[in-house]
Structure formats: C-alpha cells, structure tokens
Image (tube, rainbow, N blue to C red):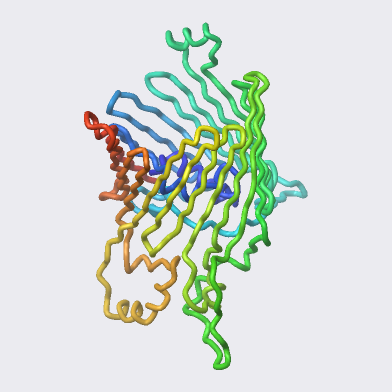
C-alpha cells in the first residue's frame, strides 16, 4: 500500500502532466509490482488529513517491533484532487501491474498574463518528515523548471547521537543531499543525478522507439461498441504481440569512493487498448504483456522478466536472475489477483450488461462502478531460494488495510520470518 506522501506526490505529477513512468529507473515497474512488493513488519498506523487542496499532514506510528513514529507536512502550488481513504480508488493506492500509455511530450501550464506581465509561477511541491524519537529529518523539493524539465532535491539529516558520533569518528556521513534533473521530451528521457555524500554522478537515458502518443489517441469514453464489419471485409489474421520497444542505460561514477557502474535495459510492452482501437477491434485482443531485460556488465548480473494479465483480474509474472561470473541464479514467480464485490443490479442494468457482454471479452475492459466494487488485491510470490511471501491489501469500512507474511521454507526452526499489519486512514476538508 502506498503511504500517504507518495500518493500525494503521484497526484501532483498527474496534476502537472509529468509522466513519471517514462524514466529508466521505472523500466521494470510492472514486474516489480508483482514480484517485489513490500510486506509490513509489525504493526503500523497512519492518519493523514488534507485541510485544503494545497496542504496535507500525515502522522504515523509503528507499535511493533519497536515504538516510533513520524510527522510529515506536504505543500504544493497546484490544487490536488486528494480522495478520502473510504472512496479512493484502490489501484491508486496499490502498486499493480499495468500497461502504460504511449509516451507523450509533457505540456506545461497555461500562461497567465496581467497588465501585460506574466504572473504565473512554476509548479512546486515541498515535503518534510520528522522521525520520532530519533530526530531524523527527510525533505523533498520538486519543481517544474520548464514544460519538459523537472528538478528534484532530496535530503536526509540525522540528529546527533552516540551512535552517530561513533560513525563520524570512522569517517561516515550521517546526512546526505541528492540533486536530480529530469528532461523528458517523450521519445527521449534523460535524468542527471548527483549525491553529496559520496560525490557520485549519474546519468540515465531511456529511448522509446516508434511514434509518440497524441491527445487524439486518448480513450474515447463515448464509444459504445465495436465498429460494424462490412460484408466484403475479411478477418485480420496474424500471430505475435504488437507493441513498442524502449531501451536505455545508466552510468554512475564516484570519485570519492573510486567506483563506477553501468547497466543496460530493454523493455517490450503491448499497446493499451483505447476507444479508437476498440472501434476497429477484430478478433481476440492481445493480453497486456510486458517483457524486460537488464544487464550489468561490471557485476555480471543478468535479469529477464515476463509479466502478463491472463484475465480481467489475474496477472502473472516470472523473473530469472543470473550472474555470469558466479553462476548464481534465482527464479521467482508471482501472481496478482483483484477481488471484486458484486452489487445488486436493477433489471434495466442487468439487461444493459447482457447487451454489452461482448465488451467484457477484452482484456483491459473494466466494468462500471455500479456493477462491481474492488474489495482488495492478493499478491503472492515464491522463489527457488525457498522464500514465500503473501500479501492482502484492501479496504475495511473507511480504512485501508495491508496484511502480509514472509516465510522461509528451508528453515524448520523459524519458518515465519516476518508478519505485519498496516492500517491507514486519511480524509479531506
């Protein structure tokens, strides 16, 4: 389950039109949602409040295994559409498998002129979080420098303590600040980073092959059915998946640590169905699929993942990791299953559902909110290293709940390595 702060940050990106999925760091986001989900450890409580569309507060407490908490504040220059925990869409709070839309060139906000002078300002977001009782401070500043350029500054500051003092005597730095500059033009996306702690410079580049998306290709909500076929029209035939390919890499160098690294990545993803494509729909639709590959030549690490939605509510994923130097390998499989609650329908709604039942044959077709309601999602993963994890995330009354367990099947003395429960509540107004 997304914490409240990342949920507000995602809402800020949507409000400003920034595509965070067009980054090399998010190349394997679809497979990671199924195979690398985090399970809460112990008991976590979170309460958040949005007094208005610009300001948000968040309070968290961890009761187990140790007692600690944090206080956070978020302010943005743009009005954000923050929902309550009782009616927020679960897929906005859960990292899940999905096929992302075609990349588009970001568009800036409209210019505002007053008395011949431009008075509009850059969009920005400020976030601060104080951990109790350690006194650690986390901070984030994000601003839109231009329609295609975004800057971020992240900082961590540790309060002085005995442990920190011992670390400073060994030359360790307990605080850090990182700068990031992202340049996205749709087909190309470049990210430059610098870390003050170890003086590390990094460059990430992602290139999308094929043409860019346009507003005219957005889903047409008014489309009520597939296009009628002509009498002399033949059925389209052919095999294989149709989609787009993205490739990129990253390079990072640290003069202080005298170290460097490089990685290469490629991703194939099918094109999401839109209203335009549904009108020209002929034959069975292809399942939403994402195939990714990563290679680190210096470490010899090779990773390949395949994820697909095999039905409306079930997605499967498998990943194989291999090291060409040590021949160490790991195979991981996972699943994601969305549970729905059927709501009573009137006779007219039932007749309408039967009339449009042909549309439910499509992989990405989502039923109307009056027909079903999301109850939650179950995620499971298992690897050849005998690690098994199970997680349920959903809504109970007005709270969001996460319940998970991690097990090590190779250990007879301690088969359950972690178990946790997380409760989250937030409201607006």
Q: Which residue appears at 38% of the width and 44% of the height?
A: 1
Counting from the top left corner in percent of width and height, residue 349 is at 32, 77
Q: Position of residue 277 (x, y in %)?
A: 55, 72
Farthest bottom residue in view:
231
Task: Classify residue 398 as left or right of residue 384.
Answer: left
Residue 420 appears anywhere in the view:
no
Q: Is residue 355 above or below residue 102?
A: below
Q: Along the line of sight, which residue is nearer the eye, 248 or 238? A: 238
Residue drawn at the location 55% of the way across and 51% of the way down: 15
From where the camera sits, is residue 406 visible? yes
Q: Is residue 102 left or right of residue 343?
A: right
Residue 115 in the image: state x and y as whole percent.
75, 49
Quick check: 72 above or below 241?
Answer: above
In the picture, residue 24 is in which quadrant? Answer: top right
Q: Nearer the viewer, residue 223 or 121?
A: 223
Q: Residue furthest right?
A: 116
Residue 373: image x %, image y %? Answer: 32, 61
Which residue is at 50% across, 40% downward? Answer: 322
């Amino acid at each position: 389950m997304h914490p409240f702060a990342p949920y507000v940050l995602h809402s800020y990106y949507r409000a400003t039109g920034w595509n965070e999925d067009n980054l090399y760091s998010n190349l394997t986001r679809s497979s990671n949602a199924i195979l690398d989900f985090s399970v809460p450890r112990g008991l976590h409580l979170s309460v958040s409040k949005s007094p208005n569309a610009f300001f948000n507060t968040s309070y968290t407490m961890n009761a187990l295994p140790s007692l600690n908490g944090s206080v956070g504040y978020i302010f943005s220059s743009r009005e954000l559409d923050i929902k309550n925990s009782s009616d927020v869409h679960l897929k906005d709070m859960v990292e899940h498998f999905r096929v992302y839309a075609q990349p588009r060139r970001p568009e800036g906000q409209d210019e505002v002129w007053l008395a011949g002078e431009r008075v509009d300002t850059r969009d920005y977001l400020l976030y601060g979080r104080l951990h109790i009782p350690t006194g650690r401070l986390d901070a984030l500043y994000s601003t839109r420098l231009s329609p295609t350029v975004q800057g971020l500054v992240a900082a961590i500051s540790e309060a002085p303590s005995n442990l920190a003092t011992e670390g400073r005597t060994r030359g360790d730095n307990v605080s850090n600040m990182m700068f990031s500059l992202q340049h996205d033009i749709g087909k190309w996306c470049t990210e430059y980073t610098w870390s003050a702690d170890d003086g590390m410079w990094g460059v990430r580049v992602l290139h999308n092959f094929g043409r860019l998306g346009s507003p005219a290709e957005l889903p047409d909500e008014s489309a009520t059915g597939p296009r009628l076929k002509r009498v002399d029209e033949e059925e389209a035939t052919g095999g294989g998946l149709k989609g787009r390919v993205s490739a990129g890499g990253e390079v990072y160098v640290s003069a202080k640590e005298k170290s460097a690294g490089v990685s290469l990545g490629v991703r194939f993803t099918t094109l999401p169905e839109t209203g335009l494509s549904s009108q020209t729909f002929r034959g069975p639709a292809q399942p939403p699929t994402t195939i990714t590959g990563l290679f680190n030549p210096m470490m010899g690490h090779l990773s390949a993942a395949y994820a697909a939605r095999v039905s409306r509510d079930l997605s499967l994923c498998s990943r194989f990791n291999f090291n060409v130097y040590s021949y160490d390998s790991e195979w991981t499989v996972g699943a994601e299953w969305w549970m729905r609650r059927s709501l009573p329908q009137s006779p007219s709604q039932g007749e309408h559902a039967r009339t449009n039942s042909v549309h439910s044959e499509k992989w990405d077709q989502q039923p109307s909110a009056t027909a079903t309601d999301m109850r939650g999602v179950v995620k499971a993963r298992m690897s050849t290293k005998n690690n098994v994890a199970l997680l349920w995330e959903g809504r109970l009354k007005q709270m969001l709940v996460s319940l998970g367990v991690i097990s090590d099947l190779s250990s007879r003395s301690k088969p359950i390595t972690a178990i946790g429960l997380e409760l989250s509540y937030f409201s607006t107004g």
